[in-house]
């Protein structure tokens, strides 16, 4: 991801630093018994934009001069990862609010573009894992279409097991690597 | 095995054909330098060329005193610096010393031969292998594989014993699935250098490459048709990973099947009339066969919940694949006629099989101490060998075709 070209804006630097802290925290998360990193669970105190039927109710568009919701650590939109069970590509219930939130952001910002990158843990055929990662990415895209994202706004690719976030060889590492990442254009 | 400091050898002192000019002596065991190997000699013939040589009547002479003996067989017991260990270490080889620049000769207990003579050794070994077994020898074939070192990935081509590695492609992003064209002139491979899987075809002679497939989504799992003019590939451009045929120049994309899930890992039969592939259409990854003319699809694997990576045997009588059993991934062989399955390997994470052109050896990727290594197993599972690269994490081996 490219860092946004920064002017002398102190606010932008602070926001970036906050984002880096958040992402840094994700990579060293304490593991729960199921192996899913704690931070990526949908917080119960989610922002108002994730519930209800308001279309495109995200506060602050991409061009707003105040905090970009995509990078605001208080916004669900700053969370970008969906985790999957072993051998599975279905989006679990706990991640549906996250997918819905991003879909509604896309729906309300027709110029926004996103790539969903699918990943797998290190076990099994490299080529089958390219296809499994692709299926995981396409499942998220399919779900976002239901919530108003258009086909042209979402690309899906797979890294298979080639680019693990966690280089470990245990259940915790594997759970962290079975994952879709949502990356917006320009990031 | 301990290498002694002295050995017995025949020594020639003059090219005059007199009995006193040739004798068995004690001399130091030669040491292999860079690019050389030390061979413990088992047997060496007395050929007419040898008799001519010691009389000074052969095409060239060696500086005296010289050890005669142009041919022999033995075991490599030591490799000099600069060679990649060690597929041949401990293996029996045939050697030739019939060159004016080779000081050593085979009428000795030990001989040093330069690495370049391995090509001749391979050809001799192929001939001997073929005469003894009736099978085609594969010593003079090449292999391709991916080497990873930190964040650097290299597509390598080497001799079938791992020596003479050449870098074909370097990238800071992963590459996978190198596949030789049937005539050995090109390699197809998948690269993530543009942050998505794209299939390239690269000419080995020129180093030029072209994009074979860069459609929306992921493009992967290339498999050459036997005529070298088309490939089967996996494309996700229509919303699911499915198998398509494509011309070698990237034109003429034709979807082969319509399944509701994942179809991938196509592998052409040697006669080009069918394709084995992996599909989860039945609920779990299994191997199926598509007959190209009729479009009929037949399931080929039935035991277990994960059977992937099919590779036809060159004689068309069966296939190699990878099965998961109790958390371990191993190679297995299945016979088309009897449907019998035999497990061939016992590692924890064996993958990416590639069958030698004579169908007798299978190269595959395994892991050892957290590092990726290549290994080979015979098609009956009885002979196993581990190949290790000097550094790096190696994976995705591909055995090249027989060269004329």
Image (cartoon, rainbow, N blue to C red):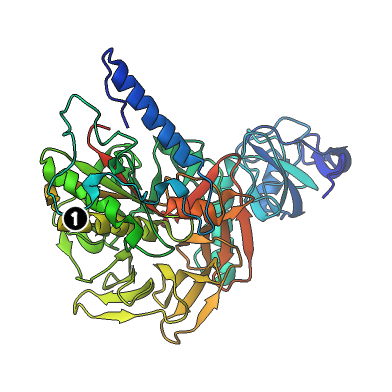
User: Which residue corresponds to the image point at 26% horizontal and 61% vertical from the top-left?
Assistant: B241
Q: Quadrant of the C terminus of chain B?
A: bottom left
Relative to B379, A63 lies left or right: left
Can residue B235 be spotted in the picture? Answer: no
Q: Nearer the viewer, residue B320 or A145?
A: A145
Mark 1 falls within which chain?
Answer: B
**Residue B294 sits in quarter:** bottom left
Crowding near the residue tagged with mark 1, few <14, some 14–19, many ≥20 C-alpha atoms within 10 Å: some
User: Which residue corresponds to the image point at 71% horizontal and 55% vertical from the top-left?
Assistant: B45
On the image, the x and y values in percent for residue B42 come to 76, 56
Q: Is residue B251 above or below residue B11?
A: below
Q: Which residue is mark 1?
A: B237
Can residue B305 be spotted in the picture? Answer: yes
On the image, the x and y values in percent for residue A161 come to 42, 52
On the image, the x and y values in percent for residue B32 come to 72, 36
Q: Is residue A110 above or below residue B231?
A: above
């Amino acid at each position: 991801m490219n860092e946004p070209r920064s002017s002398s804006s102190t606010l932008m630097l602070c926001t970036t630093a906050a984002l880096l802290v958040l992402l840094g925290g994700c990579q060293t998360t304490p593991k729960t018994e199921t192996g899913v990193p704690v931070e990526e669970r949908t917080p119960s105190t989610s922002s108002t934009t994730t519930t209800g039927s308001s279309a495109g109710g995200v506060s602050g568009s991409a061009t707003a001069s105040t905090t970009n919701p995509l990078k605001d650590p208080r916004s669900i939109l700053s969370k970008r990862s969906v985790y999957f069970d072993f051998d599975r590509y279905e989006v679990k219930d706990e991640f549906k609010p996250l997918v819905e939130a991003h879909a509604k952001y896309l729906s309300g910002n027709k110029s926004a573009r996103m790539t969903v990158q699918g990943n797998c843990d290190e076990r099994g055929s490299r080529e089958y894992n390219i296809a499994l990662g692709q299926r995981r990415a396409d499942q998220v895209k399919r779900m976002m279409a239901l919530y108003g994202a258009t086909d042209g706004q979402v690309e899906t690719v797979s890294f298979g097991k080639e680019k693990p976030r966690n280089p470990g060889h245990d259940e915790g590492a594997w759970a962290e690597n079975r994952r879709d990442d949502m990356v917006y254009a320009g990031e | 095995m301990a290498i002694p400091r002295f050995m017995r050898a025949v020594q020639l002192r003059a090219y005059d054909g007199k009995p006193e000019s040739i004798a068995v002596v004690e001399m130091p065991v030669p040491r292999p330098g860079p690019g050389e190997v030390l061979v413990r000699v088992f047997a060496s013939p007395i050929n007419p060329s040898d008799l001519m040589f010691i009389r000074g009547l052969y095409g060239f002479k060696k500086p005296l005193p010289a050890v005669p003996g142009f041919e022999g067989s033995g075991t490599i017991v030591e490799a000099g610096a600069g060679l990649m260990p060690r597929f041949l270490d401990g293996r029996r080889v045939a050697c030739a010393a019939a060159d004016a620049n080779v000081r050593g000769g085979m009428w000795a207990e030990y001989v040093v031969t330069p690495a370049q003579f391995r090509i001749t050794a391979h050809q001799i070994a192929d001939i001997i292998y073929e005469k003894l077994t009736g099978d085609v020898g594969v010593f003079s074939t090449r292999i391709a594989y991916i080497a990873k070192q930190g964040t650097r990935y290299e597509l390598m081509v080497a001799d079938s014993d791992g020596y003479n590695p050449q870098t074909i492609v370097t990238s800071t992003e992963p590459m996978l699935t190198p596949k030789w064209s049937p005539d050995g002139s090109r390699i197809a491979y998948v690269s993530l250098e543009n942050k998505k899987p794209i299939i390239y075809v690269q000419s080995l002679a020129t180093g030029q490459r072209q994009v074979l497939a860069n459609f929306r989504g992921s493009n992967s799992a290339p498999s050459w048709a036997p005529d070298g003019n088309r490939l089967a590939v996996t494309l996700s451009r229509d919303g699911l990973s499915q198998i398509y045929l494509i011309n070698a120049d990237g034109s003429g994309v034709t979807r082969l099947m319509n399944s509701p899930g994942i179809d991938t890992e196509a592998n052409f039969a040697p006669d080009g009339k069918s394709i084995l592939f992996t599909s989860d259409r039945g609920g779990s990854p299994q191997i199926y066969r598509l007959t190209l003319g009729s479009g009929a699809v037949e399931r080929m694997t039935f035991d277990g919940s994960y059977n992937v990576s099919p590779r036809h045997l060159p004689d068309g009588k069966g296939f190699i694949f990878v099965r998961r059993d109790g958390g371990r991934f191993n190679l297995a062989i299945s016979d088309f006629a009897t449907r019998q399955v035999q497990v061939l390997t016992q590692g924890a994470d064996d993958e990416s099989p590639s069958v030698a052109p004579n169908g007798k050896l299978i190269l595959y990727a395994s892991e050892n101490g957290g590092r990726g290594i290549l290994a080979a197993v015979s098609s009956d599972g009885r002979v196993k060998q581990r190949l290790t690269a000097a550094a790096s994490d190696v994976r995705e081996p591909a055995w090249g075709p027989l060269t004329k």
